Amino acid sequence: MTTKIRLATDSDIDQIKKVLSEADLRFTQETLNGFCVAEINGEIIGLVRLEEHDDFLFLTSLGVATAHQHKGIASELMNSIISKAKKPIYLYTIIPAFFIRFGFKPVSQPYPQQLNLPPKGIYGCDKCVPGHCLTMVKCPGDTKVS
Ligand SMILES: CC(C)(COP(=O)(O)OP(=O)(O)OC[C@H]1O[C@@H](n2cnc3c(N)ncnc32)[C@H](O)[C@@H]1OP(=O)(O)O)[C@@H](O)C(=O)NCCC(=O)NCCS
């Protein structure tokens, strides 16, 4: 079965909320701007969001429906957005090993003053153990590890 990767449209909202809930992720903004979905036979089974900021992109909401995990769906979504990105992509994560494979690297703190990253609280990360939540970045041209 072929997976189709495409931008989300308004009619995807219910399926997107279902996958987010299954992946234990929050729907943080009442808009689908920046959402990219993976679809099989009309069913949305995975998603990721890339927020557009002035100097960077910010990746959130990477999730795959439980029944479809470990089949490379998240990797397809990652490869799709990375191939189109023209700015550095930042993210917060508790699973850095997954993102290292795509060329992401930890950002050393303190951040550069001009780097205005979104506050962690809006992503529901405020309850995480801070030491487990890493800020990572991938710049255009950074090499993929696998
Ligand atoms: C993380 C997630 C998006 C991966 O989706 P996926 O489609 O199964 O990923 P892929 O099939 O492309 O890649 C799977 C590989 O990623 C890595 N991986 C998956 N989950 C991982 C985790 N929690 N920690 C570290 N590595 C992980 C493993 O190497 C895995 O290989 P395996 O299938 O041989 O075990 C999915 O498990 C998910 O939705 N999790 C809940 C939400 C979440 O944690 N999102 C990330 C928030 S930053």
Image (tube, rainbow, N blue to C red):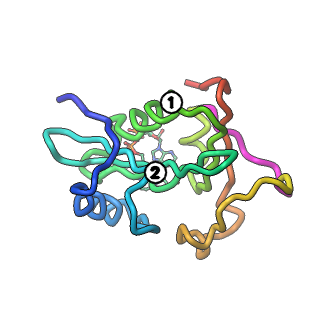
The segment highlighted magenta reads 103-111
* Label 1 sits on residue: 84
**Which image quadrant is residue 93 in?**
bottom right
Residue 50 x %, y %: 50, 48
Give the secondary structure at mark 1.
helix
Q: What amino acid type should be assigned to the residue bearing mark 2?
A: Arg
Mark 2: few/some/many CA within 10 Å (<14, 14-19, 20+)? many
Give the secondary structure at mark 2.
strand
| Number of the label disc, if any, that sits on residue 49 | 2
The Cα–Cα distance between marks 1 and 2, rounded to whole angstroms, is 13 Å
Viewer-proximal residue among 103 and 121: 121
| 41 to 60, vertically: above or below | above
Task: Give the residue displayed 68% in from the left and 43% down from the top.
Answer: 137
Prevailing secondary structure of the magenta residues: loop
Residue 77 x %, y %: 41, 38
Q: Quadrant of the C terminus?
A: top right
Residue 136 x %, y %: 67, 47
| Number of the label disc, if any, that sits on residue 69 | none
Viewer-proximal residue among 63 and 122: 122
Residue 25 x %, y %: 42, 64
Q: What amino acid type should be assigned to the residue bearing mark 1?
A: Lys
